[in-house]
Structures are given as structure tokens and as C-alpha cells.
Amino acid sequence: MANIPVGTRGEQVRLVTTENAISFLGLEGARVLSTPHLIGLMEWTCRETVFRLLDPGYDTVGTHVNVAHLAAVPIGATVSFSAEVLSASDRRIQFRVEAFDEREKIGEGTHERAIINIAKFATRMAEKLK
């Protein structure tokens, strides 16, 4: 299905914008990267880290997240996301994830993804709607 070596690493850099920042505090100066977006960008970094190693017709989906959001990051700041494969067996891939802004670590944790056959996955999802 795939050969995913332990230690495989990936990184992405993203800008904090109004689209990925909270707005519920009411003050523009209090808008920061939201926790759901932090986690989503960590997941995306993991997906991108291993996608090129998968056979055609396969992808990964998230199955478990254990992340601490350690520090706030304001709109306009840049965040670097990194992922490292800790283990890969059968269809499960375990990652260590971290995120840093220009000053400090803002998030860390682990994430698990499952390798799926996209066509079979789509068929199972269609069955759920019946």
C-alpha cells in the first residue's frame, strides 16, 4: 500500500488571517489563530508529508488528535507547522506535530491518520446515506 519511513518530515508555513482567526472576543486587536484552525493546519501538514509516498488512488484521513494550543498568535503573524512520522503500520500513521510563530512554540502534540482507498471510501460514504 505504501512505504512510509519513520522520521519522514514535512513543514508548511501559513499566515494568520481574518479567515483563520477567532472573532468572538469583539475587539479586532484580540483576534488570534483559532484552535480549530491550528489543529486543521497541523492535520494538513501531516497529510501533505506522506501524500507523495502513497500509491495512486489512496489518501489519508485524520483519526485521532491530541494537541495543546500553547500560545496565541495575532493576525499578520506567520506560523510554521511541522510533522514527523513516529510510526507507520498497516494503514495507521502516527505523527508528532509542532507549530511555531516567530517568537515561540504555539502548539504541539500527536496526530494519527489512516490510509484509505478513495474509491472504496466514497462507496462506503454513499452507503451511509441510503
Image (cartoon, rainbow, N blue to C red):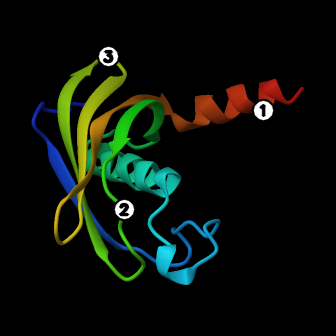
Quadrant for the N terminus, please: top left
- Disc 2 residue type? Ala
Q: Circle 1 sits on which residue?
A: 126
Mark found first going from the N terminus, 3 or 1:
3
Crowdedness of circle 1 by 10 Å Cα count: few (<14), some, many (20+)? few
Q: Position of residue 2 (x, y in %)?
A: 27, 31
Question: What residue did someone put label 2 on?
Answer: 72
Residue at position x 50%, y 73% from top? 31
Question: Can see residue 1?
Answer: no
What's the residue type where badge 3 is placed?
Asp
Residue at the disc numbered 3: 90
Q: Which of 31/78 is in front? A: 31
In the image: residue 130, left or right of residue 22 = right
* Residue 118 can be seen, yes or no: yes
Asked if 51 appears above or below 41 in the picture, the reply is above
Front residue of 126 and 101: 101
Mark 3 secondary-structure assignment: loop
